[in-house]
Image: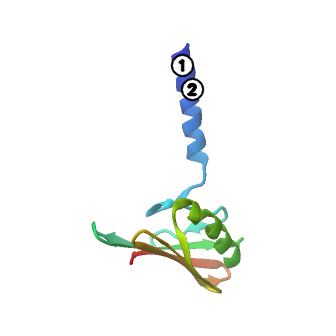
Amino acid sequence: MLRITSFFFVFLLMAGLAKAAPFIEGLEDVPMMDGMTQIKDSGVDFGNAESRLVEVYLESVKLNFDEVKSFYQKTLPQLGWAPLKNDKNMVSFGREKEIMEFAKVESSPLQIRLTVKSK
């Protein structure tokens, strides 16, 4: 009986984690903000053991850029990213040997270019 109960608990836990915030494809440690979607086949992803470049595009018809910046300014430091720059159309963070930039491309609907590159 204990085995079945343990299995059921693990199953529920895994189901809950699967329903947790999705992550950005190509950047599996960067959460996708609720209300944003990733534009499929719009980015670049290449690198090697020493460096990498990942570029993805996100969009939203519900959010504005200030809301997106605020979300990532609160979330990314918890994942080890330190704020670097913040202006009207761009916000950036650094972690170890990488830089992450969120840049507003379009306002309506909101379109953002997210780039992670080696320093």
Report the number of discs: 2
Q: Is residue 107 left or right of residue 4?
A: right
Please tell me which residue is depicted at 57% across the width and 39% down the height of the picture.
15
Where's the N terminus, which quadrant? Answer: top right
Q: Residue 109 in the image: x percent, y percent?
A: 66, 79
User: Mark 1 sits on what residue?
Assistant: 4
- 3D distance between C-alphas at marks 2 and 1: 6 Å
Where residue 61 appears, as percent x and y from the top left, is 69, 73
Instruction: Sort mark 1 into few (<14), some (14-19) or many (20+) by Cα contacts within 10 Å.
Output: few
Task: Report the front residue among 119 and 32.
Answer: 119
Against 79, residue 68 (above or below) is below
Q: Residue 84: percent from the left, percent from the top? A: 54, 78
Reading the image, the residue beneath label 2 is 8
Do labels 2 and 1 touch, CB within 8 Å? yes
Residue reaching furthest to the left:
49
Type of amino acid under label 1: Ile
Q: Is residue 77 visible?
A: yes
For the point 68% across and 82% down, which residue is it?
108
